[in-house]
Amino acid sequence: MDKFLIEVSFEAGNKVGGIWTVLTSKSAYIKKQFGENYLAIGFYNPNQAAVEFIESPPPQYIKDAVGNIKIDGLKCTLENGLLQMM
C-alpha cells in the first residue's frame, strides 16, 4: 500500500500566517517524497481564492471521495495539490 501524508489546518486554506509559511517552504521536499500522495486540507476561503486559486481536477484515487463529499452538500475543490473544503 502506498504511503500518504495528510495535513489538516486552518492555514492550508487561509494562506496566511506561520503555518502557511511552513507548508509552502517544505512543499517541494514533501512533494518529492510523496508526490500526489501528499494532501494539505483546509477550509475554502473565497477571499484568498479570488486572488490565488487555480482549480484542478482531482486525481483518480480521490475522485470517489470528492464525489461523495459533494453528495453530502459540501463543496470540495483541488488546487495545485492542495485539497480545500468548505
Image (cartoon, grey):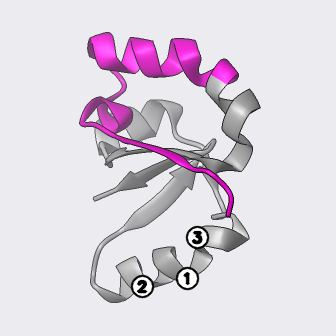
Q: Can you tell which quarter of the image residue 13 is in?
A: top left
Q: In this rendered view, identify the residue nearer to me: 65 or 55.
A: 65
Graded by Cα atoms within 10 Å as few (under 14), some (14 to 19) or many (20 or more), the crowding at tag 2 reads few
Q: Can you tell which quarter of the image residue 18 is in?
A: top left
Residue type indicated by callout 3: Ile
Q: Is residue 45 above or below residue 67?
A: above
For mark 3, what is the residue?
Answer: 62
Q: CA distance from mark 1 to mark 3?
A: 6 Å
For mark 2, what is the residue?
Answer: 68
Q: In this rendered view, identify the residue nearer to me: 77 or 6.
A: 6
Graded by Cα atoms within 10 Å as few (under 14), some (14 to 19) or many (20 or more), the crowding at tag 3 reads few
Q: Is residue 79 highlighted in magenta?
A: no
For mark 1, what is the residue?
Answer: 64
Residue type indicated by callout 1: Asp
Q: Is residue 4 left or right of residue 84?
A: right
Q: CA distance from mark 1 to mark 2?
A: 6 Å
Q: Is residue 3 above or below residue 29?
A: below
> Contact, CB < 8 Å: mark 1 with mark 2?
yes
Image point (59%, 23%), residue name: 27
Relative image position of residue 40 (x, y in whole percent) = 45, 41
Looking at the figure, which quarter contains the N terminus?
A: bottom right
Q: Is residue 60 above or below residue 52?
A: below
Q: Which segment is the magenta one?
A: 1-29
> Contact, CB < 8 Å: mark 2 with mark 3?
no
Q: Is residue 44 left or right of residue 21?
A: left
Q: Is residue 14 highlighted in magenta?
A: yes
- Dot 2 or dot 3: first in sequence order is 3
Q: Is residue 65 left or right of residue 33?
A: left
Q: Secondary structure at mark 1?
A: helix
Q: Secondary structure at mark 2?
A: helix
> Contact, CB < 8 Å: mark 1 with mark 3?
yes
